[in-house]
Image (cartoon, rainbow, N blue to C red):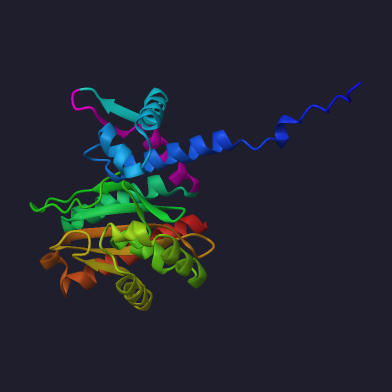
Amino acid sequence: MARRQPKADPSDRPEKGLHQNIARATLVLSTLADAAHEGLRLSDVMRSTGLSNGTTHRLLEGLVEHGLADLKADSGRYFLGMKIFSWSKSASNRFGLAERVAPVLQRLADQTNDTAYFMLRVDDDSLCLDCREGNFPIKTISVRVGNRWPLGVGAGGLALLAFLPDNDIAQIIRDHRIGREKFGIKEAVLKKEIVNARKFGYAVVDGTVIPGMSAIGVPIQGKDQKPIGSITLAAITPRLTQPRRDEIVKSLLDEARAIEHLLAN
């Protein structure tokens, strides 16, 4: 009589299908995040992710059903769901940042009349969690709440990258070259910007993301002295020349140090 084989322990089976679905859903969500303002059609998501029609449609339907994506029926475009933003807020509250940064951004926008941002570090990306507009008639909304970009893109992302340990910087530069290329950022230029940011204590981007627009970013460092977030002020380039630039840098650095002091106590 044949010997009965012992039943396999379910915990020993690799959950390849589950892991693959999570990876694909994450890819779709990241694609939607890159187009958080204008949204994407099904065909756009397919083209950006390389997934098939059926797989893309099934993933989008599931994300919509669970509140992670929204579908505007009139345009057929998909957007990040509000649940994502609520999760982002919750993540920022790990450090008590959301409530502490909001009045800072408003104060900076009121004082300068320009646009202030808060970027949170999420793995090797920067995620825009808050934005406050000043009253200057020419707006510089180059980043929108919900945008997630590779570290090194934009002044806030550059500030997050530049003040990491050398080994982390080298790995991030190596691993995310393709993601940065979408923004036209050359590795040699990025490395030079990192050196300058470390030298002066803040990051400056002049027309890299949008021609004619400039931004200054400073890191907010956690107890381990690694950046966990950044605050940025953006304006048309003529408004960020000297001597005004030095005044804005001082305000940003003062605000960042005050936040760090609160986090440390």
Frontmost residue, 93 versus 160: 160
Residue span colored magenta: 74-94
Is residue 61 at least partly visible in the picture?
A: yes
Which image quadrant for residue 140?
A: bottom left
* Residue 92 included in the magenta stretch of the image: yes
Residue extending farthest front: 1
Q: Position of residue 149 (x, y in %)?
A: 34, 53
Frontmost residue, 233 versus 189: 189
Question: How many numbered markers are drawn?
Answer: 0
* Residue 201 included in the magenta stretch of the image: no
Residue 109 falls left or right of residue 34: left
In the rendered image, the quadrant that contains the N terminus is top right
Q: Position of residue 113 (x, y in %)?
A: 15, 55
For image coordinates 76% across by 31% down, the residue present is: 9
Majority SS type along the magenta span = helix
Q: Position of residue 206 (x, y in %)?
A: 20, 67
